[in-house]
Amino acid sequence: MDLFRSASGKAATKELERIDQLFYSYSNESSGMIDPEGIEHLCSDLEVAHTDVRILMLAWKMQAEKQGYFTLEEWRKGLKALRADTIIKLKKALPELENEVCRPSNYVEFYSYAFRYCLTEEKQKSIDIESICELLELVLGSQFPQQVDLFIQYLKTQIDYKVINMDQWMGFYRFCNEISFPDFNNYDEELAWPLILDNFVDWVKSKQI
């Protein structure tokens, strides 16, 4: 048993060394982090665009705190969980990561994380409409294409809101999952929906007349 423990301990140490080596091949020497340039390089090696949702999923797996940057600690956390200590293994892990994120219990957490990840300023609580439209397309566009398309249209034409907060962001996710579309038969304005969704429903209904 001790021999087995010793062997598995050595293997884990070797794995961590390879994960660290991979980190340093992308990190910026002066900051000690993988910066936007390093992420571009990583994406190139993974053969995915830096705007690919799987890069955001990778950030979620690492629980990266700062948009466009990975610390060594975050990198270790994500790659150990994915059992990826080479770029080839990381590439192979992406489809599994996508499946993991797409489980309903994980997806709501990922959707919430996507919003927080885009808060780039200290004490920032909301995100501008243009960025929200891009983020919606990225994280929800494939699951609820019609709802997302219409909501983006609404956001771009309305003049009441300049930014979206977390409550409105999460409200739209619940809306997509719970409300029948496009008739909105089970939408009740008396329930605690964010006002922006009441306005959105009114806007869609006025277009349908």
Image (cartoon, rainbow, N blue to C red):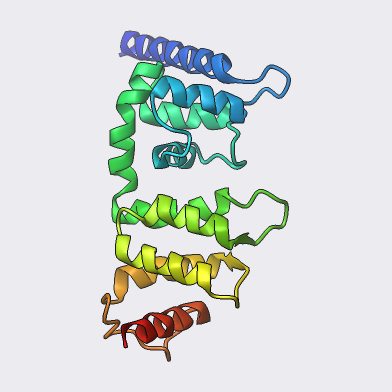
Residue 21 in the image: state x and y as whole percent.
52, 12
Residue in the image at 32% along x and 40% along y = 98
Residue 14 in the image: state x and y as whole percent.
44, 10
Is residue 112 visible to us here? no
Residue in the image at 56% along x and 55% along y = 131
Return the residue nearer the eye: 23 or 1: 23
Is residue 190 visible to us here? yes
Quadrant position of the N terminus in the picture: top left
Quadrant position of the C terminus in the picture: bottom left
* In the image, residue 39 above or below residue 166: above
| Left or right of residue 80: residue 120 | right
Residue 208 in the image: state x and y as whole percent.
31, 83
Give the total number of marks visible in the rendering: 0
Residue in the image at 45% along x and 32% along y = 78
| Left or right of residue 31: residue 208 | left
Residue 169 in the image: state x and y as whole percent.
49, 65
Corner quadrant of residue 39:
top right
Return the residue nearer the eye: 147 or 193: 147
Residue in the image at 49% along x and 31% along y = 77
